[in-house]
Amino acid sequence: MRRKIVAGNWKMNKTITEGLSLIEAIKTGAPKVQKEGVDIIVAPTYVMLSEAVKATAGSSVKVAAQNCHQEESGAYTGEISTSMVKAIGAEYIIIGHSERRQYFNETSASIAKKINSTLAKGLIPIYCNGEVKEEREAGKHFEVVKRQMNDELFHLSAEEVKKVVIAYEPVWAIGTGLTASPDQAQEIHAYLRQLLTDKYGAAVAEEISILYGGSCKPDNAKEIFSKKDVDGGLIGGAALKAEDFLGIVAAF
Ligand code: PGA
């Protein structure tokens, strides 16, 4: 059974104090809106990852890092490894977010290695893909996500891929207020699941959660999440206020 997930990607927002009060508010509000089988994840910055793990201990809220380096250790100034994330006690790592691809030159090769390193530590990758505006306008979105899946994910075995959470995030919808329509989301999520089916078989494809990301808000989440192949959301802007984030959790 694939899990339903609402994950908040805080990006470069919130000091430790601000982040801890957001976590407190999410923890307090979650029992009122969180249905059975729905996971809540927060992804704060590295500097408060440890604090976030402590603050969420014993609650239904889980913690993700926003990125990692593919190597185990070494001369990589400013980077952190998957063992460090593991040692802190976070359970997930977001990998291949479009902002990492766009501003930090992440390539398919490094994304594939980061996924391997994350899985090797027993952590769960939240693997992001999606097309940019020009690609969508040229009708190339299927081709783009297919290439990304091939180059970044499909080297995994069936046992490994089952552990991955996929987040489809059309880049033109991230932080822009433009959202994929529920039908556009469903169309591409179904396509991603079909690619998984072709590669690994239907039983494996059915176990993988595919989240939607891109200007997801309390007022559009319900319709998007009601689609058959949409298993939740990776939320940016609306994850920074407890009320909005919990409003999205309540959409299930
Ligand atoms: P957004 O970001 O919700 O602010 O569009 C989504 C994301 O980047 O994960």
Image (tube, rainbow, N blue to C red):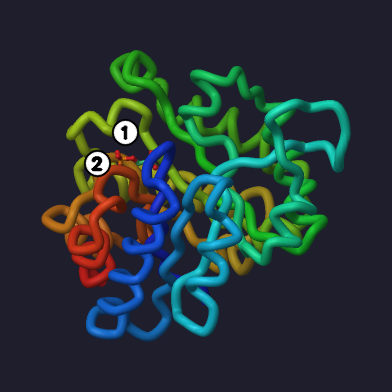
CB-based contact (under 8 Å), mark 2 and mark 1: yes
Name the residue furthest front.
17
From this view, report whether residue 211 is shown above or below residue 143. below
In space, the residues marked 2 and 1 are separated at their CA atoms by 6 Å
Is the CB of the residue bearing disc 1 within 8 angstroms of ligand 1? yes
Residue under the point 38% across and 66% down: 23
Residue annotated with mark 2: 215
Picture coordinates of residue 238 (x, y %)? Answer: 25, 50
The tag on residue 190 is none
Image spot of residue 139 (x, y percent): 34, 21
| Amino acid type at mark 1 | Ile
Q: Which residue is mark 1?
A: 174
Q: Residue at x 74, y 26 (%)?
A: 77
Within-10-Å neighbours for mark 1: few <14, some 14–19, many 20+: many
187 to 99, vertically: above or below: below
Identified by mark 2, the residue type is Ser
Is residue 96 shown left or right of residue 212? right
**Relative to residue 33, is residue 167 drawn left or right?**
right
